[in-house]
Image: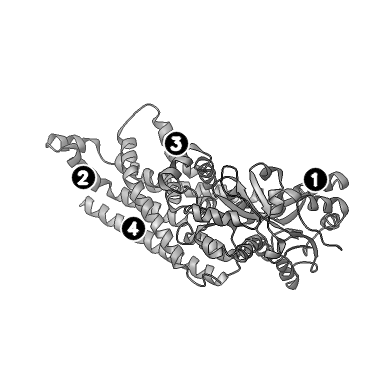
Amino acid sequence: MPHPGMDWQSFRVSLQLAGMTLLILLPIAVLIGRALALRDFRGKGFAEALVALPLLLPPTVVGFYLLQGFGRNSAAGAWFESVTGHLLAFSFEGLVVASVLVNLPFAVQPIQRAWEAIPRNLNEAAANCGMTPLRAFTRVELPLAWPGVVTALALTFAHTLGEFGVVLMVGGSIPGETRTLAISIYDRVQAFDDHSAGIMAATLLIFSLVALGLTNSLARLTARRNAR
Amino acid sequence: MRRRFSRRSFSQAALAAFSCGSVLAAGATRGAGVPVAAASDLKFALDEIALAFLRDTDLRVRPVYGSSGNFVRQIEQGAPFELFLSADEEFIFRLADKGLARDRGVLYGVGRIVLFVPQGSPMDPASDLSGLRVALEQNPGLRFAIANPEHAPYGRAAEQALRHAGLWELLRGRLVLGENVSQAAQFATSGNADGGIFAYSLALSPAVRGRGRYSLIDASWHRPLRQRMALLRNATPAAARFYDYLQQRAAREILKRFGFTLPDAG
């Protein structure tokens, strides 16, 4: 049995994947979410649909396009290989790309709702007080929208830990690189190692519950402070 | 407030869609033919046999392909399969010992493995794996696909062959592992990996044939892939007929054409 009990290496890969996804996705989600909340433009419905698409599509669709679009025989795949020296599939970077795509709605939608809830005249007031747009953003908008950002963070983090379909399709279960905890559990179950699978499943369950509970309390706390 | 509401309604909709889906799936299980669980290396061969069976008997079978280990688990949990074609005979013995299979079944073929190199890859697909060794030394970013040896019979055979050639330690960090042998083949044939070792039966299939070059690996380099099948406890007469059919000439010809070595007696 190669990994009896808890597979800490895979747990670390899962956490790193969730962290990298957040690092890349949160700034993008704030830009997109804020723009969707504040601006009206032609094709906005279509843009919103594009963001929401990963909610409806099975992860296998994303996996399929990643395998097709980033294989050696595709232009994008050949370009990526010439830059990094390896293919996007079966690499940690490939998982990050997949994860950012799949998590787009989980990050953008709460942020968009948060910005929609900010009264418009508050921005005008900030401008009248001589605040630059950047200052208004950091001092007025961001603190008010903070609970939405925290929700986006928690959902994305939890969803990445739970991601399975895309990783199974484009990962290749490489220890320390693309074998996430979810994949490791699947491999152990297939090998009839219920003992290890049980330990890992319980770890993931408890960890996710605590992480979500903490972020929810944090969001509530800041919301209460804002209300004061 | 609005955010919370929309999230809840989303999860309710998801739940409703999910339960609808499982009801539909349960409905599809009945009436569409004998449900047969088969190791994924049989994908193309068994489809052809099922077609011949339909032509000869007017009975329909519905093969489902996947990893043998997964099927054993599903059968143990009450999955409604009537016949199971495993890639590893140990799985059949396990089910027989638990009283889930009618008996210890019969051997229907012995599998072989190939080294496969996709189009556009410079690797030489020599059967002694010398080309793989050269490619490993030249290309530090090389990725090589096999089925997961922790649970897939064809992955275990690939590991044994690589060990025999003295390449296992060299290759270890560069392996991509398919969840079953069919996924390993998909990784290798799509060009997402630089090569791979998978079932001969898949290399001979029309879907894979034009996608690269391959060579058979010497059967003595790995333990024989003895593939055994057995009727399961709830098998209907139609399933029993298909089980018999698989041991007769027409089916054996097809298995032979897909590279299986056939046992002498049924």
- Same chain? Circles 1 and 2: no
Picture disc at residue A138: 2
- Same chain? Circles 3 and 4: yes
The quarter of the picture where residue A125 lies is top left
The amino acid sitting under disc 2 is: Thr
Q: Are marks 3 and 4 in contact (CB under 8 Å)?
A: no
Which comes sooner in the sequence, label 4 or label 2? 2
Q: Secondary structure at mark 3?
A: helix
Q: Secondary structure at mark 1?
A: helix
Q: Are marks 3 and 1 in contact (CB under 8 Å)?
A: no
Q: Residues within 10 Å of mark 4 (few under 14, many from 20)?
A: some
The quarter of the picture where residue B261 lies is bottom right
Q: Distance between the Cα atoms at labels 4 and 2?
A: 21 Å
Q: Distance between the Cα atoms at labels 1 and 2?
A: 67 Å
The subunit letter for the residue under badge 2 reads: A
Q: Distance between the Cα atoms at labels 3 and 1?
A: 43 Å
In this rendering, which labeled residue sits more in front, label 3 or label 1? Answer: 1
Please state which of residues A124 and B252 is positioned toward the viewer in this rendering: B252
In this rendering, which labeled residue sits more in front, label 4 or label 2? Answer: 2
Q: Which residue is mark 1?
A: B51
Please state which of residues B214 and A119 is positioned toward the viewer in this rendering: B214
Task: Answer left or right for B194 relative to A24.
Answer: right
Q: Which residue is mark 3?
A: A49
Residue depicted at x 68% and y 52%: B215
In this rendering, which labeled residue sits more in front, label 1 or label 2? Answer: 1
Residue A156 against residue B104 in the figure, above or below? above
Q: Secondary structure at mark 4?
A: helix
Q: Distance between the Cα atoms at labels 3 and 4?
A: 27 Å
**Residue B34 x %, y %:** 78, 53
The amino acid sitting under disc 1 is: Leu
Please state which of residues B64 and A159 is positioned toward the viewer in this rendering: B64
The amino acid sitting under disc 3 is: Ala
